Image (cartoon, grey):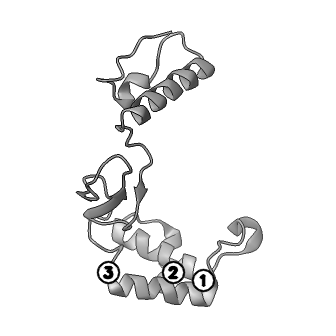
Amino acid sequence: MKNIDFEKASFKDFENIQGMDPYGWAKLWGDYVIDRSKNGQFNYRQENLSGCGPEIELNLPSNPHRNFVSLVSNDYLGFTQHPKVKAAAIAAIEKYGSGAGASPAIGATICLMKSSSGRSHFFKRSWSPDWFRFFL
């Protein structure tokens, strides 16, 4: 088994380990998780108490600091907390519910999905014949 210095390790160190089967990898990863957890340094899958945004509040039992700048958020335009986006999401849930239903191949396509799909093609400038139906 490959020896990894857990003090200096990153996720990259656990990729493509020559000659190691999935069970060996899982064992090594488990050892890493236990080691980092014992030292209060395991930051994988921490509980976010504030939702998506440029600043987040984390529940870190071993750390008195709770508010952090998030450098990994995909909320580039700040839409996840925008009042109009939230209101539109609430209105859509009230009208259509919160589930997707089934695959469009067997359960039909919700008109909301068809219109949002057309809009995303428009904004991405990916011109396919299909998206023109949105404007007809």
Look at mark 1 in the image and give the residue it sits on: 111
Q: Report the Cα–Cα distance between label 3 and label 2.
A: 21 Å
Residue 77 at what x, y percent from top left? 26, 69
Look at mark 2 in the image and give the residue it sits on: 115
Residue situated furthest left in the rendering: 69
Instruction: Determine which of the numbered discs, if any, sits on residue 82 in the image.
Output: 3
Front residue of this view, candidates 89 and 124: 89
Q: Is residue 13 left or right of residue 118?
A: left
Q: Report the Cα–Cα distance between label 1 and label 3.
A: 24 Å
Front residue of this view, candidates 7 and 89: 7
Q: Residue at x 70, y 65 (%)?
A: 103
Q: Residue at x 30, y 62 (%)?
A: 56
Q: Is residue 29 left or right of residue 101?
A: left
User: N-terminal of the two: label 1 or label 3?
Assistant: 3
User: N-terminal of the two: label 3 or label 2?
Assistant: 3
Looking at the image, is mark 3 or mark 2 nearer the viewer?
3
Label 3 environment density (alpha carbons within 10 Å; few <14, some 14–19, many ≥20): few
